């Protein structure tokens, strides 16, 4: 079955929409005992999720995980047994590096030639085949390490220390005021040059020059954050799932996305497939926002896990999800019809969904299995048409997304 929902997942943006999303890898646990790797296609108003259980991989089975990062052509996840290796494009399991880099590793960073792991009282250097190259004693407990492109940043308490590529100390980048009994655990490099400390009770923000800027709190127990190419900030929370901050500051509104279980760490691994994306723009409705449509789940017709979502709909409105093979941009009520009706290829997905019971409420309905509506290789465009009583024509349309289905 395909499930369709009116669900407040991702707020509408007052920004120009890029066509495609970025792929973000997350790790965490399901039911607090089952480790998983998830890949999220996270773009404005659209999220596609694939989850890979990890406890069935490797021998012996993985019990807990700590870090995930892109290392050369592979995706590495540190576990209690070493490094679990994956193909970032297909999520195929590539095997395990059974070295000490996994257990008790606070973080690891790839500088283009080798991997440097931060551990209690030492740095360890590894080749890409998992061979231990060198060990460097240090006099502190390093909590994380990242490669900036020119040097390493290492987290020690509330301070970020700088190291050259050969691990020569270069001084302190910046220090945040200790305002919690929970020390930060990770360094996050933002695409705009800012640096965050995250993982305790607060998020500590630094300018690109190392000046402490502000302290923020978005959710309980923030674990990590990434900034996507369109400026949005995604924060994974141990409690409350994935939060999406709409804008380039941490003071703007965020939206919780609870589809994923408990999360620990995440990293950007590249752009999403050109087989999915966004077209058209939803006109502003009586909520003061334009409605956005989103999809999540699997594009595979055999997986039967594809869902549609729409946000920012007026209280009490009804809607109809429609789909077609061609995009369009023609006047429709108070907004735009984003799918071509020429040739009879504008189709309604039954049944009508609604009414929206509350400003943040959710309504779900089901339609037949994907194979009865779509064929592998077809690209379909989706939009929500909905009522908006008391405003002009009394009806409107969301923006639109497209997806190419696979067997």
Image: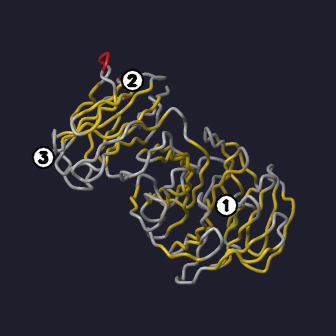
Left or right: 314 as drawn, with respect to 73: left
Q: Residue 289 appears at what percent x and percent y? A: 29, 51
Q: Nearer the viewer, mark 3 or mark 2?
A: 3
Query: For the N terminus, which image quadrant?
Result: top left
Instruction: Say which of marks 3 and 1 sits in front.
Output: 3
In what element is the residue under mark 1? loop
Q: Secondary structure at mark 2?
A: loop
Q: Residue at x 50, y 74 (%)?
A: 202
Residue in the picture at 74% in, 56% down: 110
Could you tell whether 168 is left or right of 9 in the image? right
Residue matched to label 1 = 80
Residue ID for mark 2: 325
- Left or right of residue 171, residue 166 in this image: right
Q: Earlier in the sequence, mark 3 or mark 1?
A: 1
Using the image as rendered, state which of residue 91 and residue 323 is in the foreground: 323
**In x, y percent, where is residue 59?**
68, 49
- Front position among marks 2 and 1: 2
In contact (CB < 8 Å): disc 3 and disc 2: no
Q: Residue at x 78, y 70 (%)?
A: 163
- Label 3, label 1: how far apart the Cα atoms are: 59 Å
How far is mark 2 from mark 1, CA to CA? Answer: 48 Å
Residue 166 placement: quadrant: bottom right
In the depicted structure, whether residue 345 falls above or below residue 96: above
| CB atoms of marks 2 and 1 within 8 Å | no
Which comes before the other along the chain, label 3 or label 2?
A: 2
300, 192: nearer the viewer: 192
Q: Position of residue 194 (x, y in %)?
A: 59, 65
Q: Position of residue 150 (x, y in %)?
A: 76, 61
Callouts 3 and 1 close, C-beta under 8 Å: no
Looking at marks 2 and 1 on the same chain, the residue that comes earlier in the sequence is marked by: 1
Q: Which residue is mark 3?
A: 390
């Amino acid at each position: 079955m395909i499930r369709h929902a009116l669900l407040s997942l991702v707020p509408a943006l007052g920004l120009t929409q890029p066509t495609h999303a970025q792929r973000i890898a997350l790790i965490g646990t399901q039911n607090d005992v089952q480790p998983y790797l998830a890949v999220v296609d996270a773009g404005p108003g659209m999220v596609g999720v694939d989850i890979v259980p990890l406890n069935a991989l490797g021998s012996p089975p993985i019990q807990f995980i700590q870090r995930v990062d892109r290392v050369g052509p592979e995706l590495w996840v540190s576990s209690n047994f070493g490094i679990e290796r994956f193909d970032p494009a297909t999520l195929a399991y590539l095997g395990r590096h059974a070295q000490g880099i996994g257990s008790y590793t606070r973080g690891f960073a790839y500088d283009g030639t080798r991997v440097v792991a931060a551990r209690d009282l030492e740095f360890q250097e590894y080749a890409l085949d998992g061979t231990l190259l060198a060990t460097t004693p240090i006099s502190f407990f390093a909590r994380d390490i990242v490669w900036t492109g020119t040097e390493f940043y290492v987290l020690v308490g509330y301070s970020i220390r700088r190291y050259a590529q050969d691990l020569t100390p270069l001084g302190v980048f910046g220090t945040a005021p200790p305002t919690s009994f929970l020390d930060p655990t990770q360094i996050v490099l933002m695409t705009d040059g800012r640096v965050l400390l995250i993982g305790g009770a607060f998020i500590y923000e630094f300018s690109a020059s190392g000046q402490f800027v502000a302290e923020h709190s978005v959710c309980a127990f923030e674990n990590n954050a990434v900034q996507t190419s369109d400026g949005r900030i995604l924060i994974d929370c141990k409690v409350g799932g994935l939060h999406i901050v709409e804008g380039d500051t941490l003071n703007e509104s965020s939206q919780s996305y609870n589809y994923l279980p408990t999360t620990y760490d995440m990293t950007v691994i590249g752009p999403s497939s050109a087989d999915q994306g966004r077209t058209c723009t939803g006109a502003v409705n009586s909520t003061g926002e334009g409605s956005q449509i989103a999809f999540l789940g699997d594009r595979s017709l055999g997986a039967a896990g594809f869902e549609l979502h729409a946000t920012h709909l007026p209280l009490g409105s009804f809607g109809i999800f429609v789909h077609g093979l061609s995009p369009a941009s023609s006047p429709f009520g108070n907004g735009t019809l984003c799918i071509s009706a020429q040739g009879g290829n504008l189709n309604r997905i039954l049944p009508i969904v609604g009414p929206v019971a509350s400003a943040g409420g959710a309504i779900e309905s089901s339609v037949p299995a994907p194979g009865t509506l779509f064929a592998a290789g077809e690209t379909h465009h989706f939009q929500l048409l909905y009522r908006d009583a008391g405003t002009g024509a009394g009806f409107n349309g969301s923006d639109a997304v497209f997806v190419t289905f696979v067997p």
